[in-house]
Image (spheres, rainbow, N blue to C red):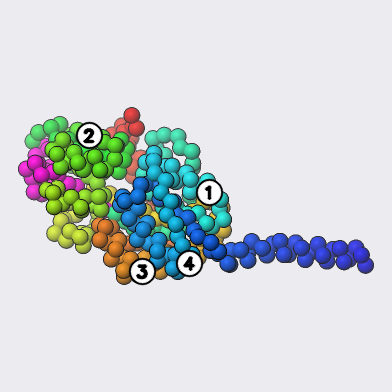
């Protein structure tokens, strides 16, 4: 009898132990949720995160706290996300450079295979722009000028192997141009250089360029499949005969690998609802971006495709971090 009672107590304890994680997951979130953004406050990526965080917090019933962990091209924030406790209280903003470019150029403290994709949040098209002193008004005029004087035109970037570097290099490869790369320490100084005439061309996220259009920067084309509401008269590279110049920065939410599926599914459902909210979509559009939700698998496959594309560009141009 005693043995049987001991056995029953043991089974009850085991069942209670097994049920505890499930109960914790069903009650999630029971406290504020941290969202790691791998870029500084005030930038375009931070702006996207702050567009979704308040509404996401309302739907989840807990505050979503943004934690900016900038540095190393977004890899510091990505590493912090992937190494966080997978208890459902830390997520990250996935940024393309740290996922699709840096792995081809250096040894990283994380593996992209460990990324637990939740959903895409937004696509930000890259724009090809020139400064006030550059005497062209269209992309065909710029290409003609570059072909007439090969090696004379400079393009700026936010640093070696950043998206502005790769985007301009892709343009040069597709259009058969010889351009000179001038790297800067971030997008802000690159834009300053464009305004001052130190460089003539800059390929950058449209959201970074929009505030400077009133100061003379001219956007010649959008490197995406569709025109953007913020600049409806600016053609796409595809319209101008360069469909291969397709550069969009894809931003989404990711989680540590071992985060319980029930939690990521609940977060995914809330995020999709947020991205379908007219006010949120409008706020994201005002930043020159397009709100987009996906399944986790669609997000993963997109990043794999982008990784393969940039690996080819890096190899052909012999791009390094030096």
Alpha carbon distance from label 3 to label 4: 16 Å
Q: Seen in the image, is 96 located left or right of residue 247?
A: right
The residue pinned by badge 4 equals 60
Q: Nearer the viewer, residue 78 or 248?
A: 78
**Magenta span contains residue 77:** no
State the image coordinates of residue 78 (x, y, percent, origin top left). Answer: 44, 46
Q: Mark yes or no: residue 300 visible.
A: no
Q: Are marks 1 and 4 in contact (CB under 8 Å)?
A: no
**Magenta extent:** 125-147
Q: Position of residue 15 (x, y in %)?
A: 73, 64
Q: Position of residue 270 (x, y in %)?
A: 45, 67
How many angstroms separate mark 3 from mark 1 (CA)?
Answer: 29 Å
Mark before the other along the chain sequence, 3 or 2: 2
The residue beneath circle 2 is: 181
Mark 2 vs mark 4: in front: 4
State the residue position of label 3: 276
């Amino acid at each position: 009898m005693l043995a049987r009672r001991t056995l029953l107590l043991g089974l009850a304890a085991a069942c209670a132990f097994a049920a505890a994680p499930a109960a914790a997951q069903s009650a999630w979130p029971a406290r504020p949720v941290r969202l790691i953004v791998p870029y500084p406050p005030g930038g375009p990526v931070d702006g996207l995160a702050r567009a979704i965080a308040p509404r996401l917090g309302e739907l989840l019933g807990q505050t979503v706290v943004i934690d900016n962990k900038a540095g190393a091209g977004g890899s510091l924030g990505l590493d912090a996300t992937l190494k966080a406790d997978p208890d459902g209280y830390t997520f990250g903003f996935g940024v393309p450079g740290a996922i699709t470019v840096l792995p081809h150029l250096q040894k990283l403290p994380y593996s992209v295979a460990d990324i637990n994709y939740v959903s895409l949040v937004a696509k930000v098209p890259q724009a090809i722009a020139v400064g006030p002193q550059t005497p062209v008004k269209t992309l065909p005029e710029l290409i003609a000028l570059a072909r007439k004087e090969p090696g004379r035109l400079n393009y700026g970037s936010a640093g070696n192997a950043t998206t502005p570097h790769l985007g301009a290099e892709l343009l040069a490869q597709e259009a058969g141009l010889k351009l000179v790369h001038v790297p800067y320490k971030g997008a802000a100084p690159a834009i300053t250089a464009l305004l001052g005439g130190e460089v003539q061309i800059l390929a950058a996220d449209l959201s970074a360029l929009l505030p400077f259009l009133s100061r003379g920067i001219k956007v010649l084309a959008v490197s995406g499949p569709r025109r953007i509401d913020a600049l409806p008269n600016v053609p796409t590279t595809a319209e101008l005969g360069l469909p291969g110049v397709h550069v969009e920065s894809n931003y989404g939410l990711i989680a540590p690998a071992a985060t319980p599926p029930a939690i990521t599914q609940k977060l995914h459902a809330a995020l999709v609802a947020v991205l379908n909210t007219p006010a949120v979509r409008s706020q994201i559009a005002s930043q020159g971006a397009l709100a987009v939700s996906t399944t986790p698998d669609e997000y993963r496959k997109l990043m794999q495709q982008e990784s393969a594309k940039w690996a080819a560009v890096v190899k052909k141009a012999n791009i390094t971090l030096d």
